[in-house]
Amino acid sequence: MINPFNTPVETGIRVLVLLAQCAPQGLDLNRLILLDHGLLHSADFGGPESLHPSIPLRSGELGVKRHDLELGLQVMLRAGLVEILPQDGGIYYRASDGADNFLALLESEYAASLNNRADWVMSTLGNLPSDRELRAHMAQTVGHWLAEFSQDVFPDRPSVVG
């Protein structure tokens, strides 16, 4: 059976929605990983009902999320919906000028739920100024997943650029 979750297209659209929410700023891959986790499991963080089912050990998703998000970003980059912003601190991604027009075409219930969760996650978690503060906030709610990652995986550096 093919897993309907986390395909490159679905992951790419989730990333695009997150990037469109923070436009014109860009986000690095580390911040996208954390925010995507919050978007999918928003109920874990006191937000609206989660987009994906609440499965046991869902914190393990973070271990494979980097690869999934990279594949999704590649799809959106090829479509011209995401731009790369090379910075001194690393590689950042930003929604292109055509992203909002593309997203406006998505009229499904899932797309509306995705936009709602992205708005919530960006206003609740996306405003935290560093990955360290974002991880700390997430750890207060779901502390068990933080122990799975070392500081080396998510180095503390600016994750948002203007």
Image (cartoon, grey):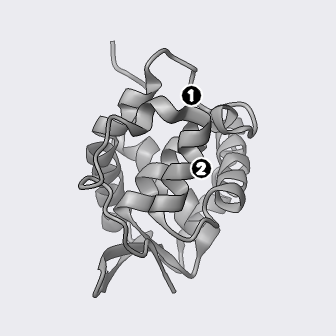
112 versus 91 height, above or below: above
Which callout, 1 or 2, points to the residue nearer the camera? 2
The tag on residue 133 is none
76 versus 108 height, above or below: below
Say which of 97 and 134 sits in front: 134
Chain-order first, disc 1 or disc 2: 1
The residue under the point 42% across, 39% down is 146
107 versus 147 height, above or below: below
Query: Disc 2 marks which amino acid?
Result: His
| Alpha-carbon span between mark 1 and mark 2 | 21 Å
The tag on residue 137 is 2
Q: Which quarter of the figure has residue 129?
A: bottom right
**SS at mark 2?**
helix
Say which of 95 and 126 sits in front: 126
**Mark 1 — residue?**
52
Q: Does residue 37 appear to the left or right of 127 in the view shown?
A: left
